[in-house]
Image (tube, rainbow, N blue to C red):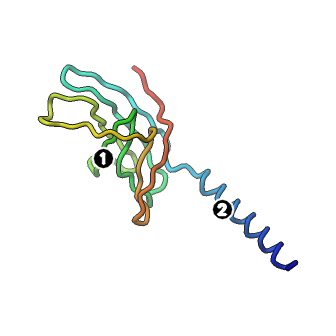
Amino acid sequence: MKNSIPKAVFLLFSFGLFFLFSCSRQLLKNQTYKSYNSNSERGYIVSFKLNDTAAVPKSVVINGIIQDISEANKTGDAYQVNVIAQTTLIHNYKVKLDKKENGIYFEKNSNVFFQPVKFKLITD
């Protein structure tokens, strides 16, 4: 009985350290968005750099709108995604909505997970 208590404390301490270090490692850097409004389209340009190349970004959520991310959005470790909020340029375009907060859906080891992100608004 006495032997199991120190082992349990050690395991809890080890798990706590692992959790602390894994959560503190940032997946992204330079996460920003900028709104645009032209005569025929409005939306957001979302940009970020990926620190963890094992996690693949699948879609981005900004202000309740979700947009898929493709390989065309990627340049090196940087991504730039056009999130269309309204358009007359694309016939029958439907905006996809998501109730999640701002963030990114990732896939890692065949698991999809959502990472909330505090995007910085860029104003011109």
Number of other residues with Cα within 10 Å of mark 1, as a class: few under 14, some 14 to 19, many 20 or more: some
In the displayed structure, 80 sits above or below 88; it is: below
Q: Which residue is mark 1?
A: 68
Q: Is residue 31 above or below residue 8?
A: above
Pick whichever, 109 or 27, lies toward us: 109
Residue placed at 18% from the left, 37% from the top? 93
| Residue 72 vertical placement versus 16 (above, below) | above
Which percent across, then down, holds residue 77? 40, 50
Res 79 quadrant in image: top left
In the image: residue 47, left or right of residue 90:
right
Comparing 61 with 17, the one in front is 61
- Image position, residue 11 (x, y; %): 73, 69
Residue position for label 2 = 18
Query: Please, what secondary structure does the residue beneath circle 2 have?
Result: helix
**Residue at x 31% of width, y 42% of height:** 67
Classed neighbour count for the residue bearing mark 2: other residues with Cα under 10 Å, few (<14), some (14–19), many (≥20) = few
